[in-house]
Structures are given as structure tokens and as C-alpha cells.
């Protein structure tokens, strides 16, 4: 399996690899966020703060339902990158087929589950009575788009493992343009479409997600020469499934624990009314853009670490951490400064109501205090994900969220700070998470978690990098495979 855009990260300049690989992912993440952001702009500015709150209140539910799939797609990237770095191409093909099958089955199941339990979950979140019905409509339609979202996600994770971050970006670009076009048409009822309001925003997103999934599958079939792999669809390889679960479940559980914690936090916030909810919803849209550079660099580090561990190049992992940290923290520091200094300017696209702007500004100022430690944590955690060592980050998230953040939120929200106490408590967690993640990274235990490894080639070029083409041929004694 090969692609013109695939990159070999086991040789060459680490900063250049990071920039070249992270930039398309950053653009792709911007486009992904644009789905919900475009909805929020149209809904918040033209349908009012209650409609914006209805869209925002269901986000923790959506995040919780896709958390498991997110972990499994991370596992797919880890496996594909390590097998690709070790030159075990049969394993790459098998992983492609198995991941597509597994993620499709789970996507269908979670979509159905999410639709069925949306009302109980919204009540559990203490969704304000004046928005709960609209929120249930938006959430129910959004659930219908989970399967194509999962298909796109696993296809993208396969390509990232091969070192190709540009192709998924092009798919998202096309889908985002479609979403931008469909939003006003379906919200306000232009042409043959009836006026659907918040439901129209949800349908526009679902249709666009399905389009990106279709493009991704067509690419894998036509361009990546995976016809042989696709014959394995609808038939699970249980060894690969177990390995995917072993790596992916802790990552998915980490996201689930985080989303469950966010549900608790949001249930506390919801007690302060729809203005506070709308302000936090608008602020969180800006916040997700602030995290994107660091998230993109962290994902790039995972792919680089996976390929280099597969190729037996542990010496290049420290370079990935060094340059990844410099890049992620530098960009995030600029974003944090902007969020602290001009939050109302950033929020103006999402809301016009003065009370909502004030609440969103307070949210952003507290949140910005945690941007830099969170950026560093994304990079270090990216190393552990690339190695397939995802269990420690699960326990770190468990500790920093449930032992630090939520108790602080509970206490501070009962003080004179009110809703700001919620946001102040949330800002502390990333500092604890970074410390614990870095301490584990320094132990070096993650190095022994690679599922595929190739002996370091004996032919070393003048630049100190191995010549992959003339290196030691693969042998059974040089491979550590499941």
C-alpha cells in the first residue's frame, strides 16, 4: 500500500516533518471545527441566544458518544504507522480492512444508542426547560451523522499512519464548503427546502459529514490500491481487533472519562441559566480553535513516533518531543494572549447579546490561562499514543479531572464567583495533567510498548539517518509482532 503523499518519517529533518505533517492536520481540524462553528454563527446571530444554548448544551453528549471511536482511530494510526515503519505491509493491509469493519459496526451501534437516550441525557445535564426540546431535535438529527463521521475518521487515521495528512484535509475542505452553503439554505428555507431553523443546521452538518465519508472511502478504494484489503470487510480479524481494543480502549476511555466529567461540569453550569450556557458555548468555539495547533502537533508527533519506533529509531523520538513542544507552545502562547486581551472581539461573530458576550469573555479569560500547559501535554501524550502506551494517560486524565477539576468546580461555583467559579476550577486541571504525563514520559516505559519493530539499519547516511532502501532486510528475529 502506497500513496504519493505518504511520508517516511524515519529519515530527514524532524522540524520539517512536523511542520509538513501538522499543517494540513491543523487546517483539517479548523475545517472540522467549522462544522459546528458555522452552525453556531448562523444559529447564534440569527435565531437568538436560546437557540445557541440549545445547540451548545448537547455537545458533551456528542463528545461522549464519539469518544470510544476516537480512541480506536488513534489505535489505527498507531498500528498503521508502526507496521509501515517496520515495512510489514501485509499487516498494514489487514489493519485497514479490520479497522473499517470494526469502526462501522461500532458507529452504527453508538448512533442508535445516542438517538434513543438523548432525552434522558439532556435531563441528566439539567438542560434548561426553555431549550431542552430544541436541543433534543438537534441532538437526534446529529446522531444520524455519527456513522459517516466514524468512517471518515478511521479513513483519515489510516492515511495519517502512512504519513499523509493532506488528503483528509482536502475531503474536509469540500465537506465544509458544502456545510457553509447548506446552512443558510436549510435553516431559513431557501429554494425547495422548508424553513427548519436549528434542525436545518443539524441536517446540513449530517449531509456534509456523509459527503466527506464518501470521498474518503472512494480514495481508499481507487487511489490507495486496497481492493485486496477491502475483501476482508464484514469479517473481523480477532487478533487485530484485540490489539486495536488494547490500544484504543484506554484512549477512548480517557475521552469518555473527560466527556463524563464535562457533563458533570455542564450540569453545574446549567444551574446558572441559558445566558451562562450560551456564553460558555460561544467561548468554547473559540477555545477549540486555540487548542488546534497543539492538537495537530500532538497527532503529528504520534505518527512520527509510531513510524520511528517501528523502524527501531528510538533516538529520533526525543527530537520529536523537543521540536513538537517548541512549535505547539509558541503558537499557543500567541493565541492565549489574544484570548486574554480581546475576548469580546473574538466572540462577536457568535453572539450579539451583551450578557452573553460578557459571560463568554469571562469564560475565555479563565480558559486561556491553561492553554500553554495543555499544549505541552498534547505533545508528550502524543509520544505515548504513538508507542501504543495509552493506559497511563487514562489514569492521568482520571486523576486531574475527577480529583482536581470537578471538586474545585463544585466548591468555587458556590462562592461569589458563581458561573466564573466553574471556569476557574477547570483551568487548574491541565497543570496537573502536564506534570503527571511528563513524569511518566521520563520513565521510558512506553518504549517497550511498540507492537512492531525493525532492527536499526547498518547503513547510515552522511546525515546520520538510515538508508531505508539499503538497510538490513526484515527477518523474523527482527520483528516484534502481535
Image: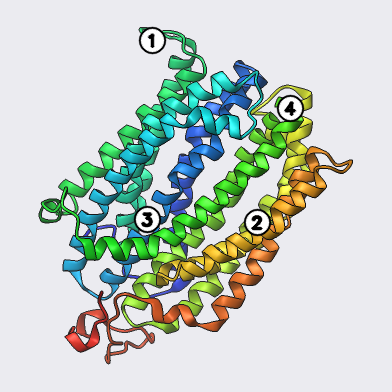
Q: CA distance from mark 4 to mark 3?
A: 36 Å
Checking the image for residue 273, the label placed there is 4
Please report the residue visible at 55 percent of the width from the left and 24 percent of the height from the top. 135
Q: Residues within 10 Å of mark 1 (few under 14, many from 20)?
A: few
Residue located beneath label 1 in the image: 193
> Nearer the observer, disc 1 or disc 4?
4
Q: Answer left or right for 474 relative to 345.
A: left
> Nearer the observer, disc 2 or disc 4?
2
Q: Answer left or right for 313 relative to 334.
A: left
Above/below status of 203 relative to 143: above
Q: Residues within 10 Å of mark 4 (few under 14, many from 20)?
A: some
Task: Pick whichever of labels 2 and 3 is earlier in the sequence.
Answer: 3
Identify the image quadrant of residue 331.
Answer: bottom right
Task: Pick whichever of labels 2 and 4 is earlier in the sequence.
Answer: 4
Residue located beneath label 2 in the image: 402
Rendered location of residue 314, percent (x, y): 41, 82
Task: Pick whichever of labels 1 and 2 is earlier in the sequence.
Answer: 1
Checking the image for residue 151, the label placed there is none
Q: Quadrant of the C terminus?
A: bottom left
Q: CA distance from mark 3 to mark 1?
A: 37 Å
Amino acid at each position: 500500500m502506497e500513496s504519493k503523499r505518504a511520508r517516511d518519517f524515519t529519515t530527514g529533518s524532524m522540524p520539517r516533518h512536523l511542520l509538513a505533517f501538522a499543517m494540513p492536520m491543523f487546517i483539517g481540524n479548523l475545517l472540522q471545527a467549522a462544522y459546528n462553528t458555522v452552525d453556531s454563527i448562523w444559529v447564534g446571530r440569527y435565531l437568538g441566544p436560546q437557540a445557541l444554548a440549545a445547540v451548545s448544551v448537547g455537545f458533551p453528549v456528542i463528545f461522549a458518544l464519539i469518544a470510544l471511536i476516537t480512541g480506536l482511530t488513534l489505535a489505527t494510526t498507531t498500528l498503521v504507522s508502526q507496521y509501515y515503519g517496520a515495512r510489514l505491509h501485509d499487516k498494514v493491509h489487514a489493519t485497514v480492512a479490520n479497522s473499517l469493519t470494526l469502526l462501522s459496526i461500532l458507529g452504527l451501534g453508538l448512533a442508535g444508542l445516542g438517538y434513543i437516550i438523548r432525552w434522558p441525557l439532556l435531563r441528566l445535564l439539567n438542560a434548561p426547560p426553555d431549550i431542552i426540546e430544541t436541543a433534543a431535535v438537534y441532538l437526534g438529527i446529529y446522531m444520524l451523522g455519527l456513522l459517516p463521521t466514524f468512517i471518515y475518521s478511521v479513513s483519515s487515521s489510516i492515511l495519517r499512519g502512512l504519513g499523509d495528512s493532506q488528503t483528509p484535509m482536502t475531503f474536509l475542505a469540500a465537506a465544509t464548503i458544502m456545510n457553509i452553503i447548506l446552512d443558510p439554505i436549510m435553516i431559513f428555507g431557501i429554494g425547495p427546502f422548508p424553513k427548519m431553523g436549528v434542525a436545518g443546521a443539524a441536517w446540513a452538518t449530517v449531509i456534509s459529514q456523509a459527503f466527506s465519508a464518501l470521498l474518503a472511502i472512494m480514495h481508499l478504494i481507487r487511489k490507495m490500491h486496497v481492493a485486496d484489503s477491502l475483501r476482508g470487510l464484514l469479517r473481523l480479524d480477532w487478533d487485530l481487533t484485540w490489539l486495536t481494543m488494547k490500544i484504543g480502549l484506554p484512549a477512548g476511555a480517557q475521552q469518555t472519562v473527560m466527556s463524563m466529567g464535562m457533563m458533570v461540569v455542564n450540569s453545574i453550569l446549567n444551574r446558572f441559566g441559558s445566558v451562562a450556557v450560551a456564553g460558555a458555548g460561544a467561548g468554547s468555539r473559540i477555545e477549540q480553535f486555540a487548542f488546534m495547533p497543539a492538537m495537530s502537533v500532538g497527532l503529528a508527533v504520534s505518527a512520527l513516533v509510531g513510524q520511528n519506533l517501528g523502524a527501531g529509531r528510538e533516538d529520533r523520538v526525543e527530537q520529536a518531543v523537543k521540536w513538537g513542544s517548541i512549535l505547539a507552545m509558541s503558537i499557543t502562547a500567541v493565541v492565549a494572549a489574544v484570548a486574554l486581551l480581546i475576548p469580546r472581539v473574538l466572540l462577536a461573530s457568535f453572539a450579539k447579546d451583551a450578557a452573553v458576550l460578557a459571560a463568554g469573555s469571562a469564560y475565555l479569560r479563565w480558559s486561556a490561562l491553561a492553554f500553554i500547559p495543555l499544549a505541552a501535554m498534547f505533545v508528550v501524550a502524543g509520544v505515548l499514543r504513538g508507542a501504543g502506551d495509552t493506559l497511563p494517560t487514562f489514569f492521568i486524565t482520571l486523576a486531574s479531572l475527577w480529583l482536581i477539576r470537578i471538586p474545585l468546580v463544585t466548591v468555587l461555583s458556590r462562592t461569589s464567583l458563581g458561573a466564573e467559579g466553574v471556569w476557574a476550577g477547570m483551568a487548574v486541571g491541565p497543570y496537573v495533567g502536564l506534570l503527571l504525563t511528563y513524569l511518566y514520559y521520563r520513565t521510558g516505559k512506553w518504549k517497550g510498548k511498540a507492537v512492531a519493530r525493525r532492527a536499526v539499519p547498518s547503513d547510515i547516511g552522511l546525515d546520520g539517518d538510515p538508508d531505508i532502501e539499503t538497510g538490513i532486510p526484515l527477518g523474523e528475529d527482527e520483528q516484534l509482532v502481535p
